[in-house]
Image (cartoon, coloured by chain):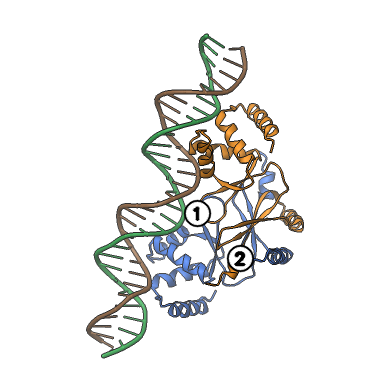
Chain colours: A blue, B orange, C brown, D green
Amino acid sequence: MNTEPYLEDFKRILKKENLRYTSQRVEILKEIASSNHHLECEDIYFSLREKGVDASLATIYRTMDLLVKHQFVRKLNIGEGRARYENKIDGEHHDHLICTECGNIIEFVENDIEVLQEEIGKKYGFKLTKHIHQLYGICEDCQNETD
Amino acid sequence: MNTEPYLEDFKRILKKENLRYTSQRVEILKEIASSNHHLECEDIYFSLREKGVDASLATIYRTMDLLVKHQFVRKLNIGEGRARYENKIDGEHHDHLICTECGNIIEFVENDIEVLQEEIGKKYGFKLTKHIHQLYGICEDCQNETD
DNA sequence: TACGCTATTGTTAATCATTCTCAATAACAG
DNA sequence: CTGTTATTGAGAATGATTAACAATAGCGTA
């Protein structure tokens, strides 16, 4: 995936807000942009480290906040542990189906639900900004593992 | 609200699992059952305290786990702070619409969404156990407060 | 290109909800 | 009433995330 355009966007946004285009921020965005997984800050920390890029965990947390704020990533609070972040740069909006046995995450798209959500917002006079929609259950594989 | 029947259920379940029907557990369930709010463990802790009932925070956390497990309450992870719990004893299933400005929580019921969720579960071969569906936005009042 | 201002970083400590440990206590079966 | 064992309370521990702050590095300007 060509991350150049996103880096350009990022640069422009940072400049507009009088923030700096640092090497750490660039590396973190590249790491996110080139992944299709649901990454934790620690994942990013160690991935970068393996590539010889040093960025502290604190910086990664700080940068993720920035990227969430500017819509480059979406923060997922799945389960209890660490937060996960997903690349929001391309691809259509989706929600998540999570297996509570094996932890596998499936992304689903259901436009009808999106429409209904909008209607609910309208009904109660809300200007919707985001939503969390996670279905939890046991996946086919785990159901079959009757041990 | 008459909490007796729920206490009886609770007692039966505890006995079945070789657990004990303690005064703390009873008081905590009564507190939850007689409230229609979304309570944090701390809320329960202080409410009981005001009534002269002592139960430690640790016990409340432990009891909430038990009540979640046996379907007396639903645990809501709204926002970042403490978990909230709602009485699941009576009333129909609903999800939540949350104002990110004032923190107000509105409960909504949308059966069409429930149906679509089931279909998604079926489509991916999941046996669904629970879901989290939270819409975030700005409520009418907060939109009008243009200061 | 060098300079100076100030945002950013890394390190470390702090926070804060929640869980764990463990000795003392209380439920409950017999 | 007694013995067994689940439960409790107090406080320590955990673990993710954030804050504080001195050192550093972007970046606009001369």
Comparing B52 with A100, the one in front is B52
* Secondary structure found at label 1: loop
Name the residue at 58% across, 33% down. B27
Quarter of the image for residue A48 reads: bottom left
Chain letter behind tag 1? A
Q: Is residue B125 above or below residue B46?
A: below
Identify the disc placed on residue B50: none
Which amino acid, mark 2? Asp
Name the residue at 39% across, 73% down. A23
Q: Label 1 neighbourhood size at 10 Å, few (<14), some (14-19), many (20+)?
A: few
Answer whether residue A129 is visible to the viewer in this image. no
Percent across and percent down for residue A129 are 60, 67
Comparing B125 with B117, the one in front is B117
Name the residue at 52% across, 79% down. A5
Identify the disc placed on residue B141: 2
Q: In this view, does C2 lie above or below A49?
A: below
Quarter of the image where the N terminus of chain A is located: bottom right
Label tally = 2
Residue that numbered label 1 is attached to = A82
Chain letter behind tag 2? B
